[in-house]
Image (cartoon, rainbow, N blue to C red):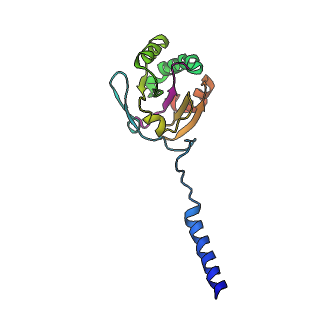
């Protein structure tokens, strides 16, 4: 009888594990290619409200950066160039400053590097937490369907822009 009870317990445990232990959905952790980008609402430094889900149908770049980051300073001119070239095709870039940045430092950075796209100060790290950002810079290339095409750490080059976003921006 004891053996029969143990067998039923073992069978029940296996069934529970199969149904609940092999969950395919991700919970927490880093965002990866194929994941849906988390929706957010933020106000940029110009006072414009940005809602990711309202930008559907076109590619979006969300870049988490710091004013003292050498990679950020080095590739921001490329972001500027790419934005100028493709903003009329619907490209949106949202630059999200790290939570510890001072407004004056961010303003100086924007002016010095000639940034013309949305800049958001993430003072309470809400967006960084939402995107699970642990290091800067981190860039999320997001497709028109709000799926993450890639998460890039460090500097970004023209090849990444073209490979990941080109098909959406070169359409007629």
Q: Where is residue 94 in the image (x, y as percent from the top left)?
A: 45, 27
Residue 76 sits above or below residue 34 on the image: above
Asked if 61 appears above or below 110 in the picture, the reply is: below
Q: Where is residue 168 in the image (x, y as percent from the top left)?
A: 52, 32
Residue 123: quarter of image: top left
Viewer-proximal residue among 27 and 52: 27
Residue 165 rendering spot, x and y as whole percentages: 55, 31
> Does the stretch in magenta take in 69?
no
Does 139 sit left or right of 42 as displayed? right
Residue at figure coordinates x 42%, y 37% from the top left: 56
The residue most toward the front is 2
- What residue sits 49% from the left and 38% below the top? 131
In magenta, the rendered stretch is 55-68
Instruction: Evaluate whether residue 76 shows in this view.
Output: yes
At horizontal 40% and vertical 19% (from top left) the residue drawn is: 103
Magenta run includes residue 64: yes
Q: Quadrant of the N terminus?
A: bottom right
Task: Looking at this view, name the residue that lies furthest to the bottom.
Answer: 1
Q: Quick check: 110 above or below 56?
A: above
Asked whether 26 or 162 is in front, the reply is 26
Q: Is residue 103 left or right of residue 134?
A: left
Furthest-right residue in this view: 3
């Amino acid at each position: 009888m004891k053996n029969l009870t143990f067998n039923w317990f073992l069978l029940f445990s296996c069934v529970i594990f199969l149904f609940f232990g092999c969950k395919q959905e991700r919970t927490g952790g880093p965002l990866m290619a194929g994941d849906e980008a988390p929706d957010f609402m933020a106000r940029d430094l110009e006072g414009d409200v940005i809602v990711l889900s309202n930008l559907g149908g076109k590619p979006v770049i969300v870049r988490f950066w710091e004013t003292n980051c050498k990679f950020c300073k080095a590739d921001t001119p490329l972001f500027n160039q790419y934005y100028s070239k493709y903003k009329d095709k619907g490209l949106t870039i949202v630059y999200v400053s790290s939570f510890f940045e001072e407004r004056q430092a961010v303003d100086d950075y924007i002016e010095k590097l000639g940034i013309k796209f949305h800049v958001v100060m993430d003072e309470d790290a809400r967006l960084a937490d939402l995107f699970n950002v642990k290091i800067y810079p981190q860039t999320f290339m997001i497709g028109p369907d709000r799926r993450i095409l890639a998460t890039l750490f460090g500097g970004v080059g023209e090849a990444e822009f073209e490979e990941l976003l080109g098909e959406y921006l070169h359409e007629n």
